[in-house]
Image (tube, rainbow, N blue to C red):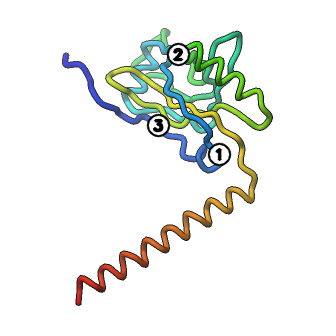
Amino acid sequence: MAKETGRKLIAQNKKARHDYHILDTYEAGLVLTGTEVKSLRQGRASLVDGFGQLDGGEAWLHNVHIPEYTQGTWTNHSARRKRKLLLHRAEIEKLFQKSQETGHTIVPLSLYFKDGRAKVEIALAKGKKDYDKRQTLREQQDRREADRAISAVRRRQRGQ
C-alpha cells in the first residue's frame, strides 16, 4: 500500500474562532486506538465541546467525540474518552504557564491526517466578551460589503 502524503481534514471547530481570541497555535499528535483511527478515516469526529487540559506534565484532550467504529467488536473505544496529546516538553511547559493566566484555555481547532498520522491543531485562547463577538461579526460584514462593491465596480468597468 502506498504511503499517504498531504493533509486530509477530518473535523474543524469554526465556533472556537468565533468564541475565542486565538493567541497561539500548536500542532500535536494524538494517542489513539485502532478503532478510533478507522472511525477518523471515515471522516467522523466532532470538536465542538472539546478542550485541552494539562495534568502532571502531560497534555490531554477532553470531550472530543469520535464515534464508535461501526464494524468494531468488543474492542471498540468509548466515544468521549480523554486522549493524550503528543507535544514537546518545552511546548507543554509554555502552554502550562500561559494557561494559568485568568481567562486562558486550550481549545482544539481542527483534526486532520498529515502524512498518514492523526494530528490536532490546538490553540491557546482567551474567551471573547459578547461585544467582542458583535464587533468581529460587524467587521466581517463590512469586509464582505466592501468586496462586493469592488467586484461590482470591476464588472461594470469590464462591460464598458
Left or right: where does residue 98 sit relative to residue 4?
right
- Gap in angstroms between the C-alphas marked 1 and 2: 24 Å
Left or right: where does residue 88 sit relative to residue 7?
right
How far from the left and from the top, in percent, is residue 132?
Answer: 70, 56
Q: Could you tell me the amino acid type at mark 1?
A: His
Q: Nearer the viewer, residue 51 or 45?
A: 51
Task: In the rendered structure, find residue 21 and report the number of the disc placed on it.
Answer: 1
Q: Residue at x 23, y 86 (%)?
A: 159
Label 3 or label 1, whichever comes before in sequence order: 3
Q: Against 128, is 110 above or below?
A: above
Q: Could you tell me the amino acid type at mark 3?
A: Ala
Name the secondary structure under disc 2. strand
Q: Nearer the viewer, mark 2 or mark 3?
A: 2
Q: Could you tell me the amino acid type at mark 2?
A: Leu
Mark 3 nearby-residue class (10 Å; few <14, some 14–19, many ≥20): some
- Gap in angstroms between the C-alphas marked 2 and 3: 19 Å
How far from the left and from the top, in percent, is residue 136?
Answer: 62, 59
Label 2 or label 3, whichever comes before in sequence order: 3
Q: Residue at x 23, y 90 (%)?
A: 160
Task: In the rendered structure, find residue 86 and report the number of the disc placed on it.
Answer: 2
Q: Quadrant of residue 41?
A: top left
Mark 2 nearby-residue class (10 Å; few <14, some 14–19, many ≥20): some
Mark 1 nearby-residue class (10 Å; few <14, some 14–19, many ≥20): some
Name the residue tied to disc 3: 11
How far from the left and from the top, in percent, is residue 98?
Answer: 70, 28
